[in-house]
């Protein structure tokens, strides 16, 4: 789901559930959803899926996502894929997840393209196929999708379905890390620390481990602390300054 939309919905209802204002907004969303407005159907489905403004109910969430999906809405199709993948309100069903992700991915929806790529990479509900994973990750990266950039980096790093290439892995990890994606920041820190695909640089390694650890990554925290034992005080100070100055930035190569 779109994070901004989720945040706005939560802000709209959180702390004001039961008040006149929240009920007015909820009634308006329901009215538009029943009239066939796909965005309102998705919003209502999201509210039911997280239990904000209404009682949490995956069955009702699925109902409204399906209404929007029937209208060809790619985000709704992706959300249905997510529910099937996680087993929300029904048994986990990878085949159903693939069905919905494919429909959305073929419309060019980047999140679905990334999710479909992951299922091909892992062989979940479908025969493992690294070439298909590469195809769908690549399509999503063309839209600057941070998770897809990291996943594409993993393919190059591991040499899955292509020739192992640390420089390409470094390139994609860095693009993702610069957007603020914690897993990519951890991966980038490791490549700087080991000098894989780039010149070894403890300051940069510490910087990216630090940023990843601030997002709750315990492994990045361990790596940062271990690396600090190999660094001078001035290097650590510089790395911490760089981390403090970091601002997410989206780049499409």
Image (cartoon, rainbow, N blue to C red):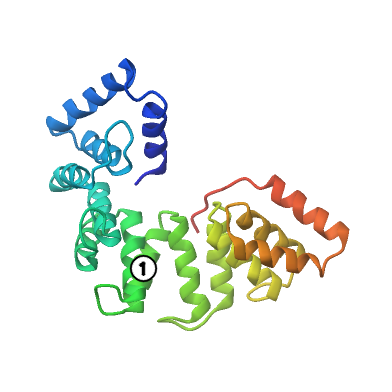
Q: From the top left corner, tell me how far across and down residue 52 is, in percent.
A: 33, 35
Q: Residue furthest bottom?
A: 163
Q: How many marks?
A: 1
Q: Residue at x 31, y 30 (%)?
A: 53
The relative height of residue 7 versus residue 13 in the rendered view (above or below) is below
| Percent of width and height locating residue 95 | 20, 68
Residue 2 place in picture, x, y as percent: 37, 44
**Would residue 226 be found to the left or right of residue 161 on screen?**
right
Is the residue 251 above or below the residue 231 in the image? above
Residue at which label 1 appears: 118
Q: Is residue 33 left or right of residue 252?
A: left
Q: Quadrant of residue 230?
A: bottom right
Q: In the image, what residue occupies the spot 52% across and 50% down?
A: 250
**Tag 1, which secondary structure?**
helix
In front: 156, or 45? 45
Q: Residue furthest right?
A: 233
| 228 horizontally vs 11: left or right | right
Residue 92 appears at what percent x and percent y?
A: 24, 64
Q: Quadrant of residue 102?
A: bottom left
How would you rate the neighbour count of disc 1 (Cα within 10 Å): few for under 14, some for 14-19, many for 20 or more? many
Residue drawn at the location 27% of the way across and 48% of the way down: 75
Q: Nearer the viewer, residue 27 or 163?
A: 27
């Amino acid at each position: 789901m779109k994070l901004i939309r989720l945040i706005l919905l939560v802000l709209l209802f959180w702390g004001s559930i039961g008040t006149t204002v929240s009920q007015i907004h909820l009634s308006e969303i329901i009215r538009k959803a029943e009239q066939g407005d796909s965005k309102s159907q998705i919003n209502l489905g999201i509210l039911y899926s997280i239990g904000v403004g209404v009682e949490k109910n995956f069955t009702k969430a699925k109902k409204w996502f399906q209404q929007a999906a029937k209208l060809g809405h790619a985000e709704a199709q992706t959300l249905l894929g997510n529910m099937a993948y996680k087993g929300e309100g029904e048994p986990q069903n990878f085949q159903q997840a693939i069905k919905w992700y494919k429909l959305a991915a073929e419309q060019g929806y980047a999140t679905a393209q990334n999710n479909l790529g992951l299922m091909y990479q892992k062989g979940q509900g479908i025969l493992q196929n690294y070439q298909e994973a590469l195809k769908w990750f690549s399509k999503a990266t063309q839209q600057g999708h941070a998770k897809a950039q990291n996943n594409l980096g993993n393919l190059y790093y591991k040499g899955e379905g292509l020739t192992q290439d640390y420089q390409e892995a470094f390139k994609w990890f860095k693009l993702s890390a610069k957007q603020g994606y914690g897993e990519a920041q951890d991966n980038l820190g490791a490549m700087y620390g080991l000098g894989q695909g780039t010149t070894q640089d403890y300051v940069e390694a510490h910087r990216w481990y630090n940023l990843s650890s601030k997002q709750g990554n315990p492994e990045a925290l361990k790596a940062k602390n271990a690396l600090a034992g190999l660094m001078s005080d001035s290097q650590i100070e510089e790395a911490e300054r760089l981390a403090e100055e970091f601002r997410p930035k989206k780049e499409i190569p």
